[in-house]
Image (cartoon, rainbow, N blue to C red):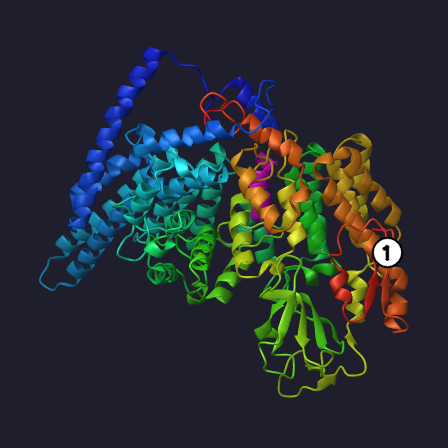
Amino acid sequence: MSFAGLLDFARKDVDLPQSSPKELLKNLHANFIHQYEKDKNSYHYIMAEHLRVSGIYWCVNAMDLTKQLDRMSAEEIVAYVLSCRNSDGGYGPAPGHDSHLLHTLCAVQTLIIFDSITKIDAKSICNYVKSLQQEDGSFCGDLSGEVDTRFTLCSFATCHLLGGLQVLNIPAAVQFLMRCYNTDGGFGTRPGSESHSGQIYCCVGALAIVGHLDDIDRDRTAEWLAFRQCDSGGLNGRPEKLPDVCYSWWVLASLAILGRLDFIDATAMKAFIYACQDDETGGFADRPGDCF
Amino acid sequence: MHFVKKVPTSEQEKAAKRKEHEKRAQQFLRVRDRIVAKRDKGEYDEEILSLTQQILEKNADIYTFWNIRRTAIEQRIEANRNYLLELDVLDEEKAKSAQKVENLLAGELFLSYECIKSNPKSYSAWYQRAWVLQRQANPDYVKELALCEKALQMDCRNFHCWDHRRTVSRMAKRTEEQELEFSNRLIEENFSNYSAWHYRSIALTKIHCDEKSVKLDDSILAAELQKVKNAFYMDADDQSAWTYTRWLLENGSGKEFLRPESCTPIQLISASFHGTNTTLVFTRAVTVPYILTLVDTDDETSWRGFSSTSPSPTSARVWQYVSDTPLQIANPLETPEKSENFAWMSLTDTPYVNVAKLKMIFDVEEPKEPAFIQELLEDCRQLIELEPKNKWPLYMRSLVLMEYRPIRSHSEIVDNLKLLAESLDTKRVELYKSLISRQKLNFSIREQFARLLSHESDELVVRYSELTSLEGVEFLAGLVGSADFSGN
């Protein structure tokens, strides 16, 4: 970390350089993703194998949002995602890897974007999800046994998209989520864990899917999220941490679900996001000036 | 990439890096293929353990390889268990076999330690530790807790480590008092440690509260306030201290029964019949199966929940039962649910209204003020004088006033919130406006409260009051038939 970086770390915020981009470089990002998809022998592509199906979803979604989805090789991607299915009904990040709820959700999302959802067996996927629900309502992410509220969202979203929510024990799952609710309005990974923006997104999203948003103090949660905005306009994941562009998604999506997008300064946040762009290659860094 | 600065590189450097990368990628693919092939054949041998280790040391996030290791280890644990049951084996041999398993588990802790050293945020590497500890014959909790402390010294906010510590302290049967002491130590080292304050709030709740109440005694709240004020006096910009203070404030609040974490039993605020429907309002959100324990119908289908975020919520505070005959409810004044000796209450002529709770919800009366609240208000006032541009003391003072002096200090509250929105914290204008809106709504309802209760007129009038939201109005469903919100 540079000395300037150290100072930012101490004051828990950053400056936006004067020369930062001032608008969204849509085409540059689309080119960046397109190139990443083409270059399957690149080091970074190979070494990120354990994240791939999730990565594919984010890339495909970004291309869809920038209306450039037709640049992606739909057939090839769909075939690849389908090849990640395991005999337990779930999907792994790449062939040969174990099934995981995260990649199962991302597989379903990707196939929906490509209008290919009929190519999968919804029932076996929902049963895979159901097999990971524990007695206390929580979910393990995979056969490892690791429990986390992130996996409740993956489960709810997957089954909801496939019309199979009824296979899950929703009341028990909601009860578990509420055990992870903190008095500051946030949610953590497990009961007793500290509030975290990413975790709040998962829990608020999960509660919204099953119509239980009023179980929490919505404005209190929205307030905690609103205080994630730093003077620079960027959002952090927890109090007293540096802003990071990824939280623009986790925090903003949560505020949107709570109907409180207006609780933060949108103009300042956009300026921060724009400043995180790499105006040579496309792509975003976590904060202005870092590598993407 | 996180925290990695972008630096220019020469063509030569780039070429060298490319070559190195290519070599590493090919090597990864070779080893990965071998691991997967062996796993598919069920060969959970020494080689697969060594190969997965090779890769995990460089990338601890490949969870599939941890899964393979766990399967391999489970097989050895199982084999050892069966071996120990055999009759014709020497004790010495059995001890050797058991020791081998223990060595394997210890080695796993070492591998995970190496992984955490290079990637302290690896979910998989941390999970492996807890998994191993659960399988060791004599896990060394002292050593494990020391490891957590070391990791927290390097990054006191690492939530993976905090989560692991929670697991280990539970396994080691550490008392909450010990964990409270631990939080003391960390807070003393660095008062700006939100994680440690959070840990403290959980420990305190576990020590002093049970499933019937999450409220702490005033004496404890006062003592905690003494502790946290050192932190906000030292740095009035630090959110950790203010959030903790807010928790103390809300923990002692009379409106605790409305909060999601409350253990106070859910109560009816009102039940009223409106010609085509019976409307029920509760202190917290409830579901239809719950409501059916209180009413004289088993019909699950004619219910409609009201929520500002969903057209058809599963769980809501306000429910309507659509029918032109009124429901009867289990008399909330006697037994709160349909038990053996309960009486029905008819809603045909008059609605049921929980006046005491409504008074609290709309601040019709001010609650009794514990002594430490006075002190907190004074602390905030001093800090506002010292640092007039700092939003936190002014906001905290306003929150305290909203809780304890909403009537006496109505104009100060509104002025403070306006100052926050207009100059001290312009990033969150709408947040402050929503709080002003609620204060003005309460003000207006207070003025009309007696009239609404007397059933003279059931029209709620809140004109020109800068309302940005009608949040809270839903509690009046039993009293209000129509509303006039013009000019907002």
Residue annotated with mark 1: B443
**Above/below status of A52 relative to B259:** above
Label 1 crowd (10 A; few <14 / some 14-19 / many >=20): many
Q: Residue furthest front?
A: A70
> Can residue B2 be seen at all in this image of the molecule?
no
Magenta residues, start to end: B184-201
For this view, does A220 lie left or right of residue A41?
right
Front residue of A166/A161: it is A161
Residue A242 picture quarter? top right
Q: What kind of element bears circle 1?
A: helix
| Residue located at (42% from left, 57% from top) | A139
The N terminus of chain B appears in which quarter of the rendering?
Answer: top left
Task: Determine the main secondary structure of the stretch shown in magenta.
Answer: helix
Q: Chain of mark 1?
A: B
Q: Position of residue A110 (x, y in %)?
A: 40, 47
Q: Quadrant of residue B448?
A: bottom right
Is residue A96 inside the magenta stretch?
Answer: no
Residue B162 location (% of width, % of height): 48, 44
Q: Position of residue A199 (x, y in %)?
A: 52, 47
Identify whether A172 is placed above or below B413: below
User: Would you place residue A105 above or below residue A77 in this image?
Assistant: below
Identified at 45% across, 31% down, the residue is A30
**Residue nearer the viewer, B183 or A232:** A232
Which residue: 84% across, 45% down? B414
Q: Judge whether residue B316 can be spotted in this image.
A: yes
Q: What is the three-letter code of the residue carrying label 1?
A: Phe
Count how many numbered circles sit on residues in the image. 1
Magenta span includes B192: yes
Judge from the rendering whether residue A58 lies leftward or rightward of residue B360; answer left or right.
left
Q: Position of residue B281 (x, y in %)?
A: 71, 69
Picture layout, residue B447 above or below residue A183: below
